[in-house]
Amino acid sequence: MSDLELEPASFRDPASTVAYLDGRVLRGLTKEGAADFDTLAAAPFFEKAMAEGRLVRTTQVPLEDLPQSVRGDAWVRALEHERIPFVSYPYEWTFSMLKDAALVHLDLLLASLGADLTMKDGYAYNLAFVGARPVFIDVGSFERVRPGEPWAGYRQFCQTMLYPLLLQAHKDLRFQPWLRGQVQGIPPQDLAKLFTGTDRLKPGVLKHVALHGAMDQRYSKSRAQDTQKELKEAGFSTELQKATASAIRKLVAKLDWGRSASEWKDYQRTSTYTDAEREIKAAFVEQALQGKGAKLVFDLGGNDGTYSRVAARHADYVVCADGDDLVLDGLYRSLRQEGNQKVLPAYLDLSDPSPGLGWRGRERAGFFDRARPDGVLALALLHHLAITGNVPLAELVDWLHALGGRLVVEFVDPTDPMADRLLANKPAGMHSDYRREVFERLLEARFDLVERQEFPSGTRTLYHATPRR
Amino acid sequence: MLAYLDAASGSLIVQAIVAGAAGAAVFLKLGWRRITSPFRRRATAEVGEPDER
């Protein structure tokens, strides 16, 4: 019996539908979609972009190979895509990740325009990351160009990629909550209200934000079909669409989040851990995962990725989730430099992880609903959730158990300077049950303990445990 | 023809400005046509184009 599942986010574009069948990623195309794909497959950049890893690996598979229930009536062609180990969404990316993803999107648009193609959308969700490599996954976005038309995806590109980048580059505001707030991103008129006075002199703001917002308001009642016809009659051309895309690319390429470069270096200098402690932890993680053949490891509160890197030596793929976007951005940039495709930085507040979003809350699955890890690292994490976040220890252990994977967890004793600092922010006695013996009792009730190791300081303990079914 | 996305007129027109000098010419021409369109529409209506309203 085949296990078929339609991709819940793949319903907006009628020409192309994604479905999962026994672990394979398949795409069905209608007649229109197939004609667009034929043009794409013949374009010189298609193979090149796949070989470079910027476009998802795609092959045609015989339609007849698929059961009728999968095919539906509208499909005339079937494609198979390379599987992305873990899909993270734009509100889980850092500034540099969103910027790199935007550049890939624009580069593919420019390549398309040189091959009688264009893109029908401009969506951040068209991209995913494999480690530090951005990859364009929506092959259904490419369509044959219609002369005289502007880029249909421009507005969506602004809302989900350019505006979030401008927010962070020009105003030092985190874009992630905005994207998580609305899957279609930030509307031009909303952003225009934020960029006032001298903000308008900053790169990209006058045209893409102020003017775009004003035009949006001015022409809100105009019929887009009429406007498109008028633009064509006034002489809009594919060349102009190219000029638009080039101008946006030039703008995106020079956007920077000033803090990222400077503060990352400070962080590495001021880290509280000693080399000896790092070595103990690294060896413990290594031993826990070695030879276990883990496919997916979640490094929760993974910070600068030190232990994600250790885990990646013994697992197929590691997601390094952390709520410090500055540190994660630094990690991403160093992984990018190494060409790392095994460690994925994910911006995530573990006390408030990404929920299900979009249509019926299913279009974009919640972070922990997307995949089940077979390994979980929770190092120097629980004291933050328990003390700062007030999450009861029993809740935390229950949560780690529900994740289902082999666990490497660290307990930081209340007498440890780091825990003490957090406790000092709370009323005395509020966290009196935050104690090692309480934690151990809870852990042993849900897990089988494999290994336990205490730090020389005596204030930190590591546990390797497997969840009891 | 429009793509599956909901196209907004303002987002289409602003692209002429984003495209630079050649685009600005299109933008000006579009503005001029919009100003003069009531006259042109009347002229074509006189030669028998069905009136939408």
Image (spheres, grey):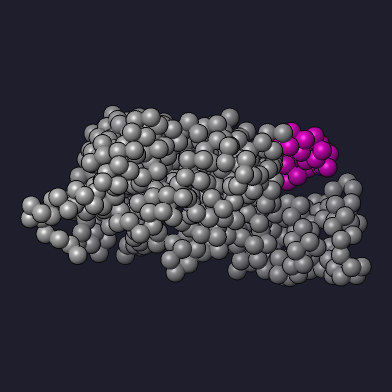
Viewer can see residue A87: no
Residue A241, quarter of the rendered image: top left
Residue at 76% in and 52% down: A380
Viewer can see residue A183: yes
**In the picture, which quadrant includes the C terminus of chain A?**
bottom right
Q: Is residue A446 magenta?
A: no
Residue A347: x %, y % from top left: 61, 50
Residue at 50% in and 34% down: A251
Nearest to the observer: residue A286 or residue B17: B17
Residue B10: x %, y % from top left: 39, 50
Region rendered in magenta: A263-287
Residue at 27% in and 32% down: A115
**In the picture, which quadrant includes the N terminus of chain A?**
bottom left
Nearest to the observer: residue A198 or residue B31: B31
Residue A466, quarter of the rendered image: bottom right
Relative to A159, residue A40 above or below: above
Residue A414, quarter of the rendered image: bottom right
Q: Residue furthest left?
A: B48
Residue A66: x %, y % from top left: 24, 56
Residue at 38% in and 54% down: A219
Characterize the magenta stretch by its predominant secondary structure: helix
Q: Is residue A153 left or right of residue A306?
A: left
Relative to A220, residue A361 above or below: below
Nearest to the observer: residue B25 or residue A302: B25
Residue A7: x %, y % from top left: 38, 59
Q: Is residue A84 left or right of residue A1?
A: right
Nearest to the observer: residue A99 or residue A158: A158
